[in-house]
Image: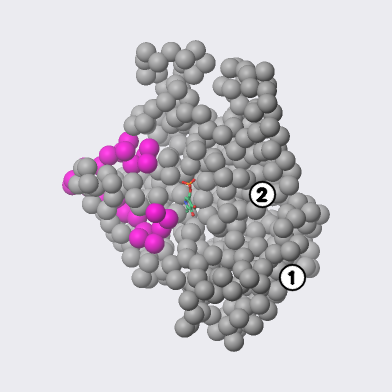
Amino acid sequence: VADDDGTLGPAIPKEDFPISRDYVYLDQAAVGLVPEPVAAIMERVTSELARGGTIVLDEYAEVMVLNPTRAAAARLIGAEPGEIAIVSSATEALNQFAWWLKPGPSTNVVVLDGDFPSVILPWLRLSEETGVEVRLVPTRAHPERATAAAIAALVDGRTAAICAGHVQYATGHRLDLGVLADVAAANDAYLVVDATQSVGAVPIDVGQTPVDMLVASSHKWLCAPHGSAFCYLARSMDDFRPPLVGWRGMLSLSDFDGRSLTFLPGARRIELGTISYAAGLALEAGIRYLQRVGLARIARHDLYLCERLAAGLTELGAHILTPTEADRRAGIVTAGFRGRDAEALVAQLRARRVIASARQGAVRFAVHVFNDRADIDHALDVLHDETT
Ligand SMILES: Cc1ncc(COP(=O)(O)O)c(C=O)c1O
């Protein structure tokens, strides 16, 4: 961290996040604050498209419109632009994968039962159809089991896929992607990662840690608005024939000829229909905003403030669910307060302009680029008042 006050210095001016003058916003894991320059791009694109139609976006431009977003997402995770699709949600891509793989009755998939619903639900639905066994690591009852080792313990030669959130949305556990990739490879299983709660907060390099698919929604740590997600599909997935298809995934994208199924090469073949181009372009701007600062520097900042927060919470007698080791967490710290209802406490904090969320019976705090030490200390003071 560059500055003593725990800020990222002039790279992240306070005025880029005006609401952070009046609130201590510790909720990036729910709805991420969008910096002013990114919000301005979204508003400009929305306005220009609404008012200008094909005068500002002709058919050729529409084919290319999300190329900068694919390139930005690729840069962010060490991929090639051809390995990136821009879709409307992480959920959409996770479903595409499950229904493509369609594992049968004598196989299993391994997921964490405390993971974000969209990571689990496609497999449960698929199980109704094919009888695939869905093996659940019981992290709801035992959050400490959100580890690559606990996942590995359920994987065997019949495992078709491991599907997991890189950082667990409720408790902030970060999984070791390198170990997971090794486990998947050793068992000839696919590895699908939902990086929605990690990418933008901690660096990811798919060149170092091979995954088959990695998805991330726009509206958390990437400092972009709702409405888009990126999906990395590894080159090793060239036999991927999307179960759901649409015009934006076809080679005929520009001539609107639907008489044959000829997919675009690379990840774009999973794109379906028109998404909000304003959201897609704002995603590019959000990624660029973070990359100006550098992901390694952001990670150090977020981890440092989380450590300070966790230490203060411990002093208050809270029970911290998130691991303390820096490589096992990212931007989330989740804490339980004995005898206190998490929803009620979150409401009390909100009344005092400290914004967090209740998840799985605990209070989830999320720290990102605009937060500083004063935010953490103020939140701890308010928590002290409200809990003692
Ligand atoms: C881990 C995780 N994945 C996915 C999502 C939602 O993504 P989407 O709505 O783009 O499917 C969320 C949050 O809402 C999340 O926390």
The local secondary structure at tag 1 comes to helix
Res 245 quadrant in image: top left
The residue at label 1 has a CB less than 8 Å from ligand 1? no
Q: Residues within 10 Å of mark 1 (few under 14, many from 20)?
A: few
Residue visible at 47% across and 83% down in the picture: 339
| Front-lying residue, 132 or 87 | 87
Residue 120 in percent (x, y) is at: 35, 52
* Position of residue 191 in the picture relative to residue 12 (left or right): left
Based on the picture, tell me whether residue 9 belongs to the magenta stretch: no
Mark before the other along the chain sequence, 1 or 2: 2
- Which color scheme is applied? one colour
Start-end of magenta stretch: 95-117
Of labels 1 and 2, the one closer to you? 2
The residue sitting at the right extreme is 10
Residue 219 in percent (x, y) is at: 57, 48
Say if 111 sits above or below 365 in the image. above
* Position of residue 386 in the picture relative to residue 127 (left or right): right
CA separation, marks 1 and 2? Answer: 20 Å
Residue 315 in percent (x, y) is at: 60, 83
Q: Amino acid at mark 1?
A: Ala
Q: Is residue 324 visible?
A: no
Q: Quadrant of the C terminus?
A: bottom right
Q: Residues within 10 Å of mark 2 (few under 14, many from 20)?
A: many
Q: How many marks?
A: 2
Residue 34, numbered circle: 2
| Front-lying residue, 273 or 200 | 273
Q: Amino acid at mark 2?
A: Val
The local secondary structure at tag 2 comes to loop
* Position of residue 22 in the picture relative to residue 28 (left or right): right
Residue 374, numbered circle: 1
Q: Quadrant of the N terminus?
A: bottom right
Residue visible at 51% across and 46% down in the picture: 216
